[in-house]
Amino acid sequence: MKSEARIAYLFAMPWILGFLTFLLYPVLASFFYSFTDFSVLRPPRFIGIENYKEMVQDEVFWMTIRNTFTYVVAAVPLSATVAILLAMLLNTKVKGLAFYRTLFYVPSLVPMVALGILWLWIFNGEHGLLNMSLEKLGMSKPPNWLGDPAWSKVTLVMIAMWGSGNAMVIYLAGLQDIPQSLYEAADLDGARLVAKTRHVTLPMLSPVILFNVIMGMIGSLQVFAVPYVMFPNGAPARSTYFFTTYLFDNAFRFQRMGYASAMGWVLFLITLTLTFVALRMSERQVHYDRS
Amino acid sequence: MKAQKFSTATVHIVLIVMSLIFVSPLLWMVTTAIKPIEETMTATPTLLPSKFLWDNFPKAVTYGSKELGYIPFLLYARNTLMVTLLCVAGSVCSNAVVAYAFARLRWPGRDAFFAVTLATMMVPFPVLMVPTFGLFKYLGWVGSFRPLWVPAFFGSAFSIFLLRQFFRTIPMELSEAAKIDGCSEVRIFTDVLLPLAKPALAVVALFTFMGTWNDFMGPMIYLSDQETFTLSLGLQAYQSQHGGTQWNLLMAAATVVILPVIVVFFFAQKMFIQGIATSGLKG
């Protein structure tokens, strides 16, 4: 073997080991476990596709799928919209850009548990900041954000929107990469703001949007910590019982690790399918600079 | 020439309103934290407390304080800090070495392995959860901090990607010149590349710090003894046992958990913004 290659393998060794131990092995093992009945106390026992068959019948499973999809469908586009709008506002050569950017970004730094607790206080029905402000503004019966199944998911989506500062920073960098000459050309053609946004800004930003929406989707499908802290056991009326929460409960509360592994693989397949669909659907819309 | 022609005044008004919306929850948290308990329960609350009870902070974080149900926050802070620092050290060392191999050295299988590495970012954590737990259970590590920091010493796809992109921007001529001067591959890495990569390494350190400090699921899976809890876990345990009563102390505790993150951010703001922008654009 050439000496460069030998040294290279030594350099790459931590990740080769890490990849085998913490990725390849768990992925293969969980695929095997998904066909077994197993807990910490019992060794795995092969049961064929029983776990998957049970899943089809499992009403709780379908409920968590519905809850999770509702959340993803609302949270991903809405927080992307907030992030893009904020980025566009900041990209107008406005004074104090760094200051505003910091203000919008800081919320996305807040640790999940502290975030959940903070919002429990804001959304508190009696003494919470939000409802008291709404009452002051003349709303006589503001929503019961935390106790009403019709509002609990809205609460979580609003929290997701509050955390869109991270994506905003990425979009802003993407906007700053768009060559000024394109806007100058559009100006010569007499394009106005809406036309420029539609025909210059969004097409040029589309690869960034695609990447971030896919990453946002993957993250939101795994939503866990904030609802876990804010809504114990998926309360109210299990409206916030999500896929990953149910998976976690199966693995570590109900001691059904085979079933949890099967759910993990279902999540993996959903993630891959949605990513594939997003990539296919965007083929015509996304503009890649081919220069 | 302006990219978009909003009127400047409108832009400022919208931005100010949005900033208020974004910042008010955090402000409300801090002002609640220094209020007397009665003032958190009135029907007509004021933004600022009648007297500033800075005392709430030591109350919230002191071991044995009755108000906080004997939650030892300082112990949890020490646990969290220890795990976080080990993760940062592990992540910086391992990812730098591995990214160097991917970016600057030639070896069979490199590009295919790199593609696989990128693809692993798509694997959801819940898929890995059960077997990884089984592995650490087998090693007898469940209940200790080891499952939380040992993996950091074996690299992570995201950081490898970030550092590789950075290493590739450094001209190869630099390495070749060092080689002609008789430098070994190891010396080129430690003496030539690493000093240049400091900003990128700092970004990896920052992201690892944030990720570990904020981690909730990991500690929840592996830690069961109250003495070993991290801040996130301790805060959650406290909230689920005593939540909804003493909001002022709870907010003080939350502030204490958030503060280090915000402080780190302010010292490293530029690096942060650049790091996030690169990671999201070059994907």
Image: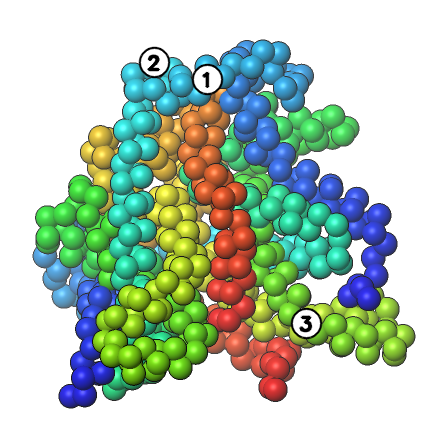
Q: Amino acid at mark 2?
A: Lys
Q: Chain of mark 2?
A: B
The quadrant holding residue B95 is bottom left
Q: Chain of mark 3?
A: A
Q: Amino acid at mark 1?
A: Asn
Q: Nearer the viewer, mark 3 or mark 2?
A: 3
Measure the C-alpha gap from mark 3 to mark 2. Answer: 58 Å
Q: Is residue B257 left or right of residue A75?
A: left
The quadrant holding residue B67 is top left
Q: Nearer the viewer, mark 1 or mark 3?
A: 3
Q: Amino acid at mark 3?
A: Ile
* Image position, residue A101 (x, y; %): 63, 49
Residue on which the image places disc 1: B56
Q: Identify the image quadrant of the C terminus of chain A.
A: bottom right
Q: Chain of mark 1?
A: B
Q: Within 10 angstroms of label 2, few (less than 14), some, or many (20 or more) residues?
A: few
Residue on which the image places disc 3: A178
- Element type where label 2 sits in the image: helix
Above or below, comparing residue A49 to residue A62 in the picture? below
Q: Are marks 2 and 1 on the same chain?
A: yes
Residue at position x 32%, y 57% in the image:
B92
- Element type where label 3 sits in the image: loop
Measure the C-alpha gap from mark 1 to mark 3. Answer: 49 Å
The label shown at residue B66 is: 2
Q: Identify the image quadrant of the N terminus of chain A.
A: bottom left
Q: Within 10 angstroms of label 3, few (less than 14), some, or many (20 or more) residues?
A: some
- Specify whether residue A198 is in view: no
Task: Work out whether mark 2 precedes mark 1 in sequence or the reverse, and give the earlier one.
Answer: 1
- Specify whether residue B73 is in view: yes
Residue at position x 58%, y 69% in the image:
A208
The one of B81 and A191 positioned closer to us in this rendering: B81
